[in-house]
């Protein structure tokens, strides 16, 4: 999930419009709208303001994103295994304590 997708997900979880997010973050509506229309990642001060408005830290924003990326990669790799390797992996995981 990229930065804008993550912001959008968090915004939607709160039930906020893009304009409401801008207001809560103390940013202009055009600043936030331009992120979406131009598909550009925000600069750090803008991202910090968005995170503050959403009630999370920058660290949390990226930590969760990294965890999601790792989970997605793990799932993708498991799906690409042969049936025999999936069975072997499952057996290995059952033995991990």
Image (cartoon, helix red, strand yellow):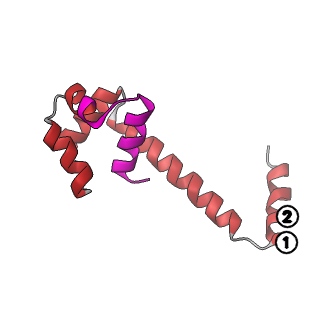
Residue drawn at x 45%, y 46% is: 65
SS for tag 2? helix
Can residue 12 be spotted in the picture?
yes
Q: Residue 15 at what x, y percent from top left? A: 40, 29
Instruction: Please state which of residues 84 and 96 is positioned toward the viewer in this rendering.
Output: 84
The Cα–Cα distance between marks 2 and 1, rounded to whole angstroms, is 5 Å
Q: Which quadrant of the structure image shows residue 61?
A: top left
Can residue 43 be spotted in the picture?
no
Label tally: 2
Residue drawn at x 79%, y 48% is: 96
Tags 2 and 1 touching, CB below 8 Å? yes
- Residue denoted by label 2: 87
Q: Residue 14 at what x, y percent from top left? A: 41, 28
Q: Which residues are magenta?
A: 1-20
Residue drawn at x 20%, y 40% is: 46
On screen, residue 55 above or below 37: above
Q: Which quadrant of the structure image shows residue 72?
A: bottom right
Q: Residue 32 at what x, y percent from top left? A: 21, 42
Task: Please indicate whether residue 82 sits to the left or right of residue 39 in the image.
Answer: right
The circle drawn on residue 84 is: 1
Task: Please indicate whether residue 60 sits to the left or right of residue 92 in the image.
Answer: left
User: Dot 2: few (<14), some (14–19), or many (≥20) neighbours within 10 Å?
Assistant: few
On screen, residue 77 above or below 12: below
């Amino acid at each position: 999930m990229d930065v804008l997708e993550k912001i959008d997900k968090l915004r939607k979880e709160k039930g906020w419009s893009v304009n409401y997010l801008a207001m809560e973050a103390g940013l202009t509506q055009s600043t936030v709208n331009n992120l979406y229309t131009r598909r550009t990642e925000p600069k750090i001060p803008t991202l910090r303001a968005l995170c503050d408005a959403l009630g999370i830290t920058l660290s949390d924003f990226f930590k969760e994103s990294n965890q999601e990326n790792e989970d997605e990669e793990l799932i993708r790799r498991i799906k690409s295994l042969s049936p025999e390797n999936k069975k072997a992996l499952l057996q290995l995981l059952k033995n991990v304590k």
